[in-house]
Amino acid sequence: MFICTNCGQLTDDKYTCLKCGWRADGLLKTWGKGYKYTIIETGTNEEIFIPIELLKEGVKNDKEKS
């Protein structure tokens, strides 16, 4: 599951939000709020919506710091 960087809704697709139609691989991408990574073997850069697993890890790490 991913969170759309435009409307904040959950989506199953890492590139397309079915709720608002926003595309993470479109002209404006994720407005700089998404997740960016590089595939080392090909040198390809990807930008996708925010995986909810990253948010869960962030919450866990914040609680550990307190």
Image (cartoon, helix red, strand yellow):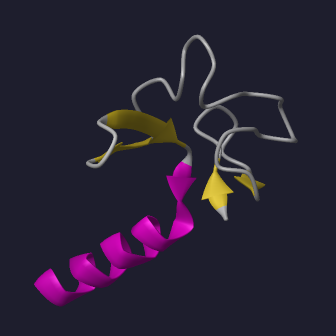
Q: Main secondary structure of the magenta part?
A: helix
Confirm whether residue 66 shows in the render.
Answer: no
Q: Position of residue 39 (x, y in %)?
A: 34, 47
Q: Does the magenta stretch include residue 64?
A: yes
- Residue under the point 32% across and 71% down: 58
Q: Does the magenta stretch include residue 12?
A: no
- Residue under the point 53% across and 42% down: 48
Q: In which quarter of the image is residue 2?
A: bottom right
Q: Where is residue 66 in the image (x, y as percent from the top left)?
A: 15, 84
- Furthest residue to the top? 27
- Furthest residue to the right? 19
- Furthest residue to the left? 65
Describe residue 31's horizontal placement relative to residue 11 as left or right.
left
Describe residue 66's horizontal placement relative to residue 63 as left or right.
left
Describe residue 23's horizontal placement relative to residue 31 as left or right.
right
- Residue range of the region highlighted in magenta in the rendering: 50-65
Judge by depth and name the residue closer to the eye, 3 or 41.
Answer: 41
Q: In which quarter of the image is residue 15?
A: top right
